[in-house]
Amino acid sequence: MAVTAASERTALVGQALEGMGQLVRVFHRNFHAPHELELFELTMPQCRAVLFLADGPAPMTKLAGGLGVSLPSATGLVDRLVDKELVARFEDAADRRIVKCRLTPAGATMAEGLYEADVAVLRELLNALSERDVATVLSAIDLLLGAARQAAPPPDPSPSA
């Protein structure tokens, strides 16, 4: 009986992941068309890096891990963002072997623009739903945020700047 419950749970999680994946694909296909990214003059990986760094400076290794790319790929991506004057590199004060990245003021403005564009799309989608459906979405978001907070690693104790 426990095996059945576990397999049903696995199936439900799989369905949720598939649904979320479909939502992300529809969201990006319909609302983040290539012409919109061209307005920001960024590729999707560059957008992801800018949004990652919006949370604060990060070592290159953490950026690469957060983006799910190799360190050389992250380095190339950051090189292009440095060329666009959106990201700056600096050495860690405690360990000069560690290279960190942070958004420049222009990068922070870009991150805010990307965030605002996403919020506008989400507002449009939510406004198309009934009040009851929006409440259901809100409950689901609360559940996911609670799980994310429990699974989150502890904050990095090293200084960020």
Image (tube, rainbow, N blue to C red):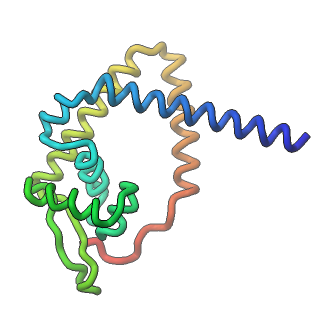
**Near-viewer residue (61 or 143):** 61
Question: Residue 14 location, x and y as percent?
Answer: 63, 36
Q: Residue at x 23, y 64 (%)?
A: 75
Q: What residue is rendered at 17% in x and 28% in y?
A: 35
Residue depicted at 56% across the width and 25% down the height: 136
Q: Is residue 136 above or below residue 37?
A: above
Q: Nearer the viewer, residue 154 or 83?
A: 83
Quarter of the image for the C terminus: give it: bottom left
State whether residue 101 is above or below residue 9: below
In this figure, what is the number of numbered marks? 0
Q: Give the vertical position of 116 relative to 146 (above or below).
A: above
In the image shown, does 77 or 108 lie closer to the viewer? 77
Side of 71 where 40 appears, left or right: left
Q: Decide if residue 25 is on the left or right side of residue 98.
A: right
Instruction: Report the side of 20 relative to 126 (left or right).
Output: right
Place of residue 33 in the rendered image (x, y in percent of width and height, measured from the top left): 24, 27
